[in-house]
Amino acid sequence: MAMAVMRDKAAAEVFELSTGVHASAVVRAAVQLGLADAVGDEPVTLEALASAVGARQDTLGRFMRLLTAYGIFAEVGEDRYEHTPTSRALRSDAPDGPAGIIRLGGDWNWILWGLLAHSVRTGESAFQAHYGQDIFAYFDQNRQAGDAFQHGLSVVARREDPLVAEALPVKEGECVVELAGGKGNLLRAVLERHPGVTGVLVETEQALDTVDPALREGPLAERFRAFPGDCQTAVPGGGDVYLIKQTLHMWDDETCLRVLANCRRAAPPGARVVVVEQLLTDGPAERRTRLMDLHMLLVAGGRERTEKDFAELFHRAGLSFGGIRGEAGDLRLIEAVTPEA
């Protein structure tokens, strides 16, 4: 394909957007090959690098030439390369772990974005349409993809969960019930941040088998309880705060309403439901959330929501909208209150 030089500015901008997949593929391939981990503190020869990552020397040389054009590695002599700050960020041991997040999507993510027009036309999940099953059933059958997904989520959680625990409006002696909380990483952060609080994790039997060991053993175990089940069917009663982090955006409105109504029925009067999600708003940083909105459509038929959307969902579920109660990075803590008796 010829890379055309366009004199019309608008045409050039649109063309540049259309080739964004190329840059994504370059970064993803660098992570898949493990190049950043194969380069140490000293420059490395192309021959040694090819041997370390199991690649042909000639094609790797062509790839490294492109990576240096993006500022990923620097050539410091003929066929000798060293790290740049950008390439160091792709190491597995980098502080914010973007490599793990990049691996999270796997091959299925590339396939789904190629089906965006289908989902826009039909409103259907591209994942369901392509694979004939939902994403979690797929992960059950493809453990490598599932493990990469869970590892990527854990990288994100290490950054987000302490911020959510800090911002969570909870008082001494209250019980926090987390719905669909995976391994319980967020609930652990809440219990560590609030020593006078107890916690209940609602998850499937399979997920509870892999719960964070710190919740089962040691001092936190006395304040922790597991509740096996599906929050779309039922949730335990007696909670003061029902916590739902980045789960509702995977579901359509009717599924969300079932879960919220379960909370209303189970919770005592005046209990709070705290939903932790990104909010669709207007502003210069909004592109990322709008991309995530379409990503949720592709993956599970879900969506990101505005503050007004959440207020309407809560009202339909018989809850009172309590407003935005806190921030945790890009996430917002959106509160609903169960009606008084």
Image (tube, rainbow, N blue to C red):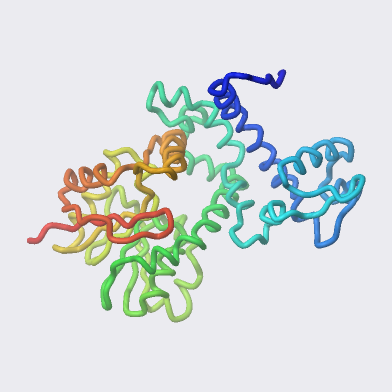
For residue 162, which quarter of the picture? Answer: bottom left
Q: Provide residue 100's location: percent of width, then percent of height.
A: 61, 52
Left/right placement of residue 210 relative to residue 227 reads: right
Which corner quadrant of the image does residue 333 belong to? bottom left
**Is 170 left or right of 264, judged from the image as shown?**
right
Q: Can you say whether 53 is above or below 123 in the image? A: below
Q: Is residue 283 left or right of residue 80?
A: left
Q: Give coordinates of residue 158: x percent, y percent.
A: 51, 63
Furthest-left residue in this view: 341
Q: Is residue 240 above or below residue 335?
A: below
Give the x, y percent position of residue 108.
57, 36
Quarter of the image with the C terminus in it: bottom left
Quadrant position of the N terminus in the picture? top right
Task: Determine whether 326 is above or below 102 in the image.
Answer: below
Point 21% across, 49% down: residue: 261
Please provide percent x and percent y for residue 164.
39, 63
